[in-house]
Image: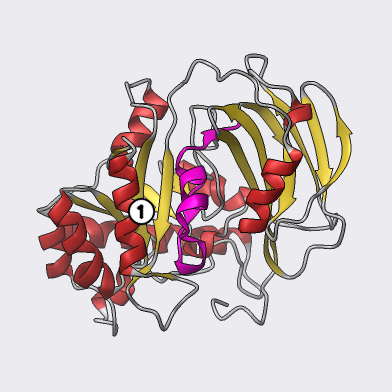
C-alpha cells in the first residue's frame, strides 16, 4: 500500500479544483479484533483505536451503514467525510474487543452475520444473546448468507434453476434467522461472502431487494453500483494512518459507465477495463492513474478527455485481483474506483 501511495504522488498531475460535493461516503470493513494469530483478517486494538481517534479528531461523521446508504441513494442530507464501520463474520472478538471500544465512544457499526455458524455455536463466534446486547447499544446486524458460501459458484452438474433455488434458500434462511433473533432488519443488506460476486448473482440478489457490498476499495456515491458497493478492507498490514487518511477522505470517481461490469473472468485475460466519466465530472480522464492491487501500473490502451481503457501487463492469476483507479480531487483528496476480478479459486488461498 505504501508503494501504491507513492505511485499516486509521483504519477498524478496537479489537482483540479474540487467540485461541488454530492452525497457520498466511505465504508470500512473489518473481520477480527486483537487476534494476532490471524494477521490477514485481524486489526490490532491499538490500530483500531488510533483509527477511531483520527476520525473523531479530524471531524469525520460516523453513521450506521443503513443510514448512510439511504441518504446517498434517496437524496438525503449527508455530511462530507461520512464513514460507516462494518464487520464480516461475527467473530467473538467483535463482542469482546471491538464492542467495548465502540460503546465507550457511542459509535455505531454494522456486523454481517453468517447465521449457521451462530446457530451451531461455532468456536470463536458470537452468540445471539451477545448480539442482542450489542443491538441495544447501536450495533446493527445484516446478512452474510446462512452458510458463508461462495455464492457465485455453481456446484458440479448444477443447473441455473437449481443454483438460483439454492442461493435464494441460503439468503432467505439467514434473513429469517436474523429477524427471528434480532427483530425486523429494515432494507435488506448483504455482504457477499469472500467479496465474490458475478453479474448473474448480483441480478438475483437485486431481485430479492438487497443492496450488496463487496470487498473492493472505493467510495460510494449516487451512481455507484448498488449490487457491488465498495468497502475498504482493514487489517493490521493496511492500518497505517497515512494510507488510512487517504482512504477515508476519498470520493467516488464520477463515472457515466464502465465496460465490462462483469468481474468474473471468462475468456479475455488480462481483461480490458474502460471507464467513461460523466459529463459533470470536474476532471479529465487523462488525470486517472490505474494500478494492480500490488501497486504496479496498468497499461494504458486508450485515453481521452472522457474515457480511459487500461489492461494488466500480464495474465491475472487464479483467485482474486483488482484494478485500482484514482485521480486527484483537490485538497489532498482522491477520487477512487476499484474493479475486482475473480478468476476461479486459488488453491493456495486458505479461504477456498
In depth, the one of 178 and 81 nearer the eye is 81
Q: How many marks?
A: 1
Q: Is residue 261 visible?
A: no
State the quadrant of the N terminus. Answer: bottom right
Tell me which residue sits at (86%, 61%) in the image. 314
Q: Position of residue 341 (x, y in %)?
A: 69, 56
Q: Say whether residue 112 is magenta.
A: no
Q: Position of residue 104 (x, y in %)?
A: 13, 55
Q: Position of residue 232 (x, y in %)?
A: 49, 51
> Looking at the image, which is closer to me, 350 or 205?
350
Between 148 and 320, which is closer to the camera in this rendering?
A: 320
Residue 104 visible from this viewpoint: yes
Above or below for 178 versus 119: above
The relative height of residue 52 versus residue 343 in the rendered view (above or below) is above
The residue indicated by pointer 1 is: 51
Q: Residue at x 61, y 78 (%)?
A: 349
**Residue 242 drawn in magenta:** yes
Looking at the picture, how far across and down is residue 74, in whole percent?
37, 24
Assess disc 1: are there few (<14), some (14-19) or many (≥20) residues with their C-alpha within 10 Å of its C-alpha.
Answer: some
Report which quarter residue 196 is drawn in: bottom right
Q: Name the quarter where the C terminus is drawn.
A: bottom right
Q: Choose top left, top right, bottom left or bottom right for residue 317.
A: bottom right
Relative to 281, is 286 above or below?
below
Q: Relative to 323, is 143 on the left or the right?
A: left
In this rendered view, identify the residue nearer to me: 26 or 334: 334
What kind of element bears circle 1?
helix
Image: 31 above or below 50: below
Q: In the shown orientation, is residue 152 left or right of residue 285? A: left
Q: Which residues are magenta?
A: 230-253
Q: Residue at x 29, y 85 (%)?
A: 123
Amino acid at each position: 500500500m505504501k508503494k501504491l501511495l507513492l505511485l499516486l504522488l509521483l504519477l498524478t498531475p496537479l489537482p483540479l479544483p474540487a467540485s461541488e460535493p454530492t452525497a457520498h461516503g466511505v465504508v470500512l470493513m473489518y473481520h477480527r479484533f486483537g487476534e494476532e494469530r490471524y494477521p490477514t483478517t485481524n486489526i490490532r486494538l491499538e490500530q483500531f483505536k488510533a483509527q477511531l481517534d483520527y476520525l473523531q479528531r479530524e471531524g469525520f461523521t460516523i453513521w450506521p451503514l443503513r443510514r448512510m446508504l439511504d441518504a446517498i441513494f434517496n437524496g438525503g442530507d449527508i455530511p462530507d467525510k461520512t464513514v460507516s464501520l462494518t464487520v464480516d463474520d461475527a467473530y467473538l472478538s467483535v463482542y469482546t474487543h471491538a464492542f467495548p471500544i465502540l460503546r465507550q465512544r457511542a459509535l455505531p457499526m454494522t456486523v454481517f452475520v453468517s447465521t449457521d455458524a451462530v446457530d451451531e455455536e461455532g468456536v470463536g463466534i458470537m452468540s445471539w444473546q451477545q448480539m442482542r446486547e450489542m443491538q441495544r447499544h447501536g450495533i446493527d446486524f445484516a446478512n452474510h448468507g446462512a452458510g458463508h458460501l461462495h455464492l457465485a459458484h455453481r456446484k458440479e452438474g448444477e443447473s441455473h434453476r437449481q443454483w438460483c433455488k439454492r442461493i435464494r434458500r441460503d439468503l432467505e434462511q439467514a434473513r429469517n434467522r436474523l429477524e427471528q433473533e434480532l427483530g425486523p432488519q429494515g432494507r435488506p443488506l448483504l455482504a457477499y461472502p469472500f467479496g465474490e460476486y458475478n453479474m448473474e448473482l448480483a441480478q438475483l440478489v437485486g431481485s430479492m431487494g438487497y443492496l450488496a457490498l463487496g470487498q473492493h476499495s472505493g467510495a460510494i456515491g449516487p451512481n455507484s453500483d448498488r449490487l457491488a458497493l465498495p468497502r475498504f478492507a482493514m487489517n493490521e498490514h493496511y492500518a497505517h494512518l497515512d494510507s488510512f487518511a487517504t482512504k477515508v477522505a476519498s470520493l467516488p470517481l464520477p463515472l457515466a459507465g464502465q465496460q465490462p461490469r462483469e468481474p468474473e473472468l471468462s475468456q479475455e485475460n488480462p481483461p480490458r477495463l474502460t471507464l467513461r466519466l460523466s459529463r459533470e465530472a470536474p476532471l479529465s480522464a487523462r488525470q486517472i492513474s490505474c494500478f494492480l492491487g500490488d501497486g504496479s501500473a496498468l497499461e494504458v490502451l486508450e485515453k481521452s478527455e472522457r474515457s480511459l481503457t487500461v489492461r494488466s501487463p500480464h495474465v491475472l492469476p487464479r483467485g482474486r485481483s483488482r484494478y485500482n483507479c484514482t485521480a486527484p480531487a483537490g485538497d489532498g483528496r482522491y477520487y477512487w474506483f476499484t474493479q475486482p476480478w475473480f478468476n476461479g479459486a486459488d488453491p493456495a488461498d486458505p479461504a477456498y
